[in-house]
Image: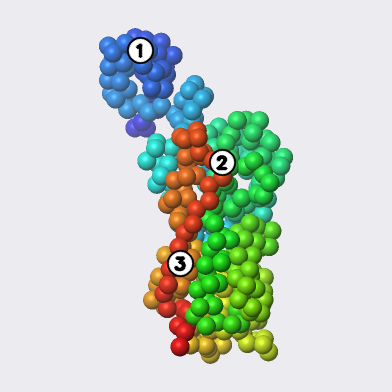
Amino acid sequence: MEKKNYTSQDVADMAGVSQSTVSRVFAGNTNVSAKKRKKILEVAEKLDYQPNAIARGLITNKTKMVGIVIKYFHNPFYSEVLSAFYNRLSSLGYHLIFINSDNDEIQASEINLLIDYKVEGVIITDAILSSSAAKKLSRNNTTVVLFNRYIKDSESKAVYCDNYFAGRQLATYLVEMGHKSIAFISGPFNTSTTIDRKQGFEEVLAERGLPPLHVESGIYTYESGFKAAQALVAMKEKVDCIFCANDITALGAIEAIREMGLSIPEDISVVGFDDINMANWPSYSLTTWKQPIDEMVDNAVKLLLGEETNQENVVKLKGNLVIRKSVKAKK
């Protein structure tokens, strides 16, 4: 026999109250007598009634739903980010709506979906939010927080790792290890992450009187790292170290270097950025810059939900160097 899905009206009829009273109880409204509340909850338990989250949100204007948009979900960094957001928001009683955008720019249909679900906020990672989409979310009073990047000269809320500082620290470490001819496999050049990591790194090389970076463009993927590393190794002018704009790019570079008969770090050193779980695998043992994911997520959630009204709209965090075995030590 098929189970009946009871409604708030069924609960109201059996409890002898109005439907609005049932709604107020499940919305957490305290302006209902203890006696009525007890009766309503007893009836709801008997009928196995669960209020619909979206319907409840229409009444309370609080859906307890948050949207997150990720483009490069195949990047393990963002799967770890998604997990961290899920755990943090779930602990606060929120539900996460995940959109894996297939385009560089978030589409109108994706924005409309989030608005239809009446999300209380949207976290945007590596997809681009157009000005028209931003205005549409603003008109619907939907808070937007950029994660792992920022937009220069913008009022957008953002949480990100200090990539400029990290680039300088990585370059300083590699120079001190004796590297003199360093290459860079980039991410997309229109992102703050790539721009800042490259700028910080290049400044240190210039200050130390070393040649500028050999740059091969990439798109933060394993495949682009593999292809770029092949091109760098094949160059007439040899490089002794490759700085990869993120870890998954570095893993692709490591595989390409090994396929070409070279050893890491004896022939070429490789460093990454993010400190994904795979970076610590013995087959890679990748030296990298660790992004403080938990701290970044915690700050993004605070900005999104307005937990700290005195908090700055843009939060920049440091991270730290993680030294493993992919960099050749100075003799």
Task: Report x, y in % for residue 144.
Answer: 58, 40
Q: CA distance from mark 2 to mark 1?
A: 38 Å
Whether residue 307 appears in this view of the structure is yes
Q: CA distance from mark 1 to mark 3?
A: 56 Å
Q: Secondary structure at mark 3?
A: strand
Q: Using the image, tell me which numbered label, if any, was put on residue 321.
A: 3
Along the line of sight, which residue is nearer the eye, 40 or 181? 181
Pointer 2: what residue? 313
Task: Report x, y in % for residue 317.
Answer: 50, 53
- Type of amino acid under label 3: Leu
Identified at 52% across, 88% down, the residue is 267
Task: Report x, y in % for residue 19.
Answer: 42, 14
Q: Residues within 10 Å of mark 3 (few under 14, many from 20)?
A: some
Along the line of sight, which residue is nearer the eye, 288 or 201? 201
Q: Is residue 43 above or below residue 308?
A: above
- Type of amino acid under label 1: Val
Identified at 59% across, 82% down, the residue is 180
Task: Report x, y in % for residue 315.
Answer: 53, 47
Residues under numbered marks 2 and 1 in contact, where contact means CB atoms less than 8 Å apart: no
Identified at 32% across, 27% down, the residue is 48
Q: Secondary structure at mark 2?
A: loop
Mark 2 / mark 1, whichever is N-terminal: 1
Pointer 1: what residue? 32
Q: Using the image, tell me which numbered label, if any, was put on residue 17.
A: none
13 relative to 264 in the view: left or right: left
178 relative to 151 in the view: left or right: left
- Quarter the N terminus occupies: top left
